[in-house]
Image: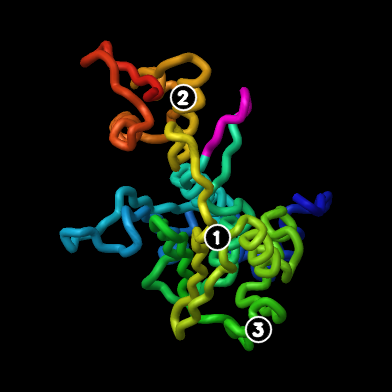
Amino acid sequence: TKRPYSGEVNRMLAEIGAVTADGKPTVCGLLLFSEYPQRWLPQSGVVFAKFVGTTPRGESGLAGYTRREELIGPVPRLIEATWNLVWSEMAISAVVKGLEREETFEYPQFAVREALVNAICHRDYRLRGRRIEVRMFSDRLEVISPGGLPGFITVENIKDEHFSRNPRLVGGLFHWGYIEELGLGIDRMMEVMQQAGHSPPKFDARPYSFAIALHNERSQPELPEWSRDTNHRQARALQYIRETGSITNREYRGLIQTVSAETLRLDLVDLVEKGVLTKMGAKKGTYYVLRE
């Protein structure tokens, strides 16, 4: 935490608004400290989906996502789980210069985390029928929060004015370090996006939802033939191959233990189809090397 607390736990919980005067948990208390707040607040989770193209529908008209996850838990755990999921699916442009590998991530880390924290902090928890949605498309990342903009905030003044729908929740996350400085997140999000060569975040305010879209519009330098946009898992596989000369499915599973064996197999198939890797051998003797 940013502010150590040496007093009684019950007093601390009362001070931050996690419990009422008679000791009953508040919505803020459930969101911050309950092991499973979705038992009482089913709308407090996050739905993540990664899509193949730039629209939610594929060529057949069916859902075009390649991965969909429903995330639950208290707010701090929800933020970390959602960030880790987005990070694992983020494309990486990589170039090797000498013995060093330079990586450029699809979106700046601060911009992504701020969009996630902003949605969780400021959504309208009275709307019970919808969760926060995080959508990854080939050209953008969207974070959609249930509930319109709070108070007097508009898209036009969002950078200069500040108003919180859930001040106790914001205060708790600030003391835990998830919010670096109150009121400056949107400003810095715009700054880091432009520094990375992207356009500023785009905001879409509607009566019952608010969306932040981070667009990947950076001009891409011409990369060597063997270099391609990859997700983080594939980037680790390529680094491993450059260090050892090859990789097997078993070795890849040892490197990445957070997704299924089938997902990892498809990662390698994708790199072969892109012309980055060459598949050698067959069946249990299969291994992969960089294509010359």
> Is residue 22 among what the camera can see?
no
Q: Which image quarter is the C terminus in?
A: top left
The residue located at (33%, 37%) in the rendering is: 274
Task: State the colouring used for the structure image.
Answer: rainbow
Q: Amino acid at mark 3?
A: Asn
Q: Which residues are magenta?
A: 94-100
The residue singled out by tag 2 in the image is 255
Q: Mark 2: few, some, or many residues within 10 Å (few <14, many ≥20)?
A: few
Q: Quadrant of residue 55?
A: bottom left
Residue at point 48%, 49% (across, down): 86
2 or 3: tag closer to the N-terminus? 3
Amino acid type assigned to the residue bearing label 1 in the image: Leu
Residue 223 in percent (x, y) is at 49, 40
Side of 100 relative to 171 (left or right):
left
Q: Residue drawn at (65%, 76%), measured in percent from left and top?
A: 164
| Residue on which disc 1 sits | 116
Rendered location of residue 115, percent (x, y): 57, 63
The reply to whether dot 2 and dot 1 touch (C-beta < 8 Å) is no
For the stretch drawn in magenta, what is the main secondary structure? Answer: strand
Q: Which residue is mark 3?
A: 157
Q: Is residue 166 above or below residue 115?
A: below
Describe residue 201's horizontal placement relative to residue 174 as left or right: left
Give the secondary structure at mark 3.
loop
Q: CA distance from mark 2 to mark 1?
A: 27 Å
Decide whether residue 168 is among the magenta residues: no
Of marks 3 and 1, the one in the foreground? 3
Is 96 within the magenta?
Answer: yes
Which residue shows up at 60% across the image and 36% down it?
A: 102
> Is tag 2's residue or tag 1's residue first in the polypeptide sequence?
1
As measured in the structure, the alpha-carbon distance from the residue carrying label 3 to the one carrying label 1 is: 20 Å
